[in-house]
Image (cartoon, helix red, strand yellow):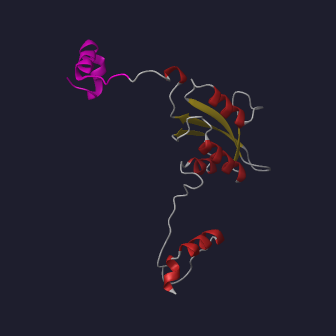
Amino acid sequence: LGFLVEWPILHQLHQLTRFYHCAEQPPKMIHVSDGGAVDSSGVLQLLRRRINRILFVLNEDDPADRLPGLRKLIAAAIDEKVASFYDPDDPRHDWKEVLQAFAADGSKSFLHLGVHYGWQGETRAQGHLVVLKNRVPSVMRGAKVQPLLTEEEIVGDIQQNPSLAKGNLCTT
């Protein structure tokens, strides 16, 4: 019956039932996961630790700025009763309004959410979640790609302004 250990349906059953192997001998096969199915960014762990300031660099294929990864992360934090989120400029506004405003304004490169840690009866604390999204600003859409800098341009800039070469970042 050892072949059943490698059977995919048994693996799914173990995941479903949250099976925990307890024996003197280790199992023949171990499945390891980084938790990426829920949050591959690590932000949920930071929220669980009630970190005051979190910078989340979001890089997902989302040209319409619907922010599915961020929405999933926020939903998980709320479902776990870790935190609630709001607009820090006007706490009466829900976090969804901040996301909608970000999507509507293509010139913004980041969004800022207030974090209210804790749940009913718990000690409450405030925090900040700044989300930096990799997207082309609206003013640059349709612009032609600029040519790469040449060595002559870089060396010329350093010769004109020697302070650029401080710290041995660049030598001529």
- Up/down of 30 relative to 58, above or below: below
| Left or right position of 48 against 58 | right
- Residue 99, given in percent of the width and then of the height, sits at 66, 34
- Depth order, front residue of 27/148: 148
- Up/down of 37 relative to 103, above or below: below
Residue at point 49%, 22% (across, down): 140
Q: Is residue 170 magenta?
A: yes
Residue at point 73%, 28% (across, down): 90
- Up/down of 50 relative to 24, above or below: above
Residue at point 52%, 20% (across, down): 139
- Depth order, front residue of 21/141: 141
| Left or right position of 127 against 21 | right
Residue at point 67%, 28% (across, down): 101
- Residue 106, given in percent of the width and then of the height, sits at 58, 25
Residue lying at the far top of the rendered structure: 160
- Residue 163, given in percent of the width and then of the height, sits at 30, 18
Q: Is residue 151 magenta?
A: yes
- Main structural element of the magenta stretch: helix, strand or loop? helix
| Left or right position of 160 against 78 | left
> Magenta part of the protein: which range?
146-172
Instruction: Please identify the quadrant where the C terminus is shown.
Output: top left
